[in-house]
Amino acid sequence: MRKLYLLALFSALAVLALGSLALAESRIEKDLTLAPNGRFVLDADAGSVTVTGTSNTSVTWSLSGGAGQDLGTISSTGLYTAPASKPSPAQVTVTATSVADTTKFTSATVTITGISVSVSPPIATVTVGATRQFTAAVTGTSNTSVTWSLSGGAGQNLGTISSTGLYTAPASVPSPAQVTVKVTSQADTSKFASATVTVSNVTVNNTATIEVGPEPDLGSNSYVNLPFVDVTICEPGSTTNCQIIHNVEVDTGSEGLRLLQSVVTLNLQAVTDNSTNQLQECVQFADGSYIWGPIYTADVQIADEKASSVSVGGNTVTGVPIQLIPASPSPGAVRSAWSG
């Protein structure tokens, strides 16, 4: 297994004052996030740590962190090598101490990341004999190689999957019809991600009719020649509590589904934070305008293609987040906000 060698030289100066001089800087200003086996250099001679007030500018390097954890190593010249696996906690403190006066020191915090694996799409329906391409993403290591495998009903023909993630469904539907596609990191075989494939003998129609016309009900302010499609939304997990929403604009410059709250009659579940505050989304358009609306979850279907779950942070969440735009799309007091 190849190791990741990341060299990053600190540009900020940290000053260790001796004698009667005050301590001008008590920390190295640039913290780092490293993958396992990653490296960075803190070199006193190169200017990342400067000792003043004495002719002895030598420093000693040390590490501190979780008790009993492998924190990595640091050389006498300030070359830090992260451990092969993420410690707990993931933060390691690198300290440079003046040899002339050991009460004077400076430090930096290094966060060690672990290997993470994800697979896309997390859920798929494949007709018997058809194929579906899956893709994997591996972070936290330079070795991004993966191994693909299948699991399902005992003794069933589950189909095949290639070394590049191309799944071919069997000629007949297995029992049960669900097949698990697993992708495993070769750098750390304890790290993996899974997707669920439902094998069907019904041909899925993934073609939807697009109607082109002006924006409805906006009179002289309407744009012309816009594409629209019908979208079906359902309460998560339901096949009966559903509603067809007509004239949904297909906007290739944005993502997600946004609907006018006034046309939705379903009892959808609101998305909240840990304090049960309903989450709102602010969407900015190309002309600089923006609009607010609360977030709900729903099963979303166009033609015969249905999305009933989404992968968030490696976890499968029931229902797809959609935004419902109220008649007065402006929030109350915003408790917190972020971008990303």
Image (tube, grey):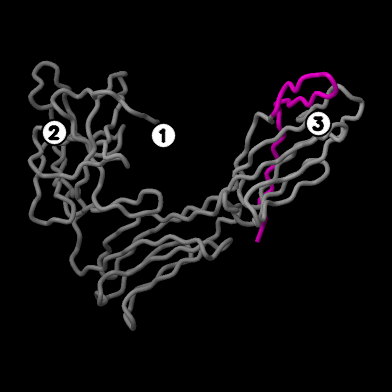
| Quarter the C terminus occupies | top left
For label 2, the residue is 261
- Determine whether label 1 and label 2 are within 8 Å by CB: no
Q: Earlier in the sequence, mark 1 or mark 2?
A: 2
- Determine whether label 2 and label 3 are within 8 Å by CB: no
Q: Marks 2 and 3, Cα distance to the nearest angstrom?
A: 60 Å
For label 3, the residue is 46
Residue 139 rendering spot, x and y as whole percentages? 53, 50
For label 1, the residue is 340
Residue at the (30%, 37%) spot, across then down = 255
Seen as rendered, the residue at the extreme top is: 220
Which residues, given as a range, are shown in magenta? 1-26
Residue at the (55%, 59%) spot, across then down = 145
> What predominant SS class does the magenta segment belong to?
loop
Closer to us: 299 or 167: 299
**Type of amino acid at the residue the image marks with label 2:** Gln
- From the viewer's perspective, tell me whether residue 152 is left or right of residue 109: left
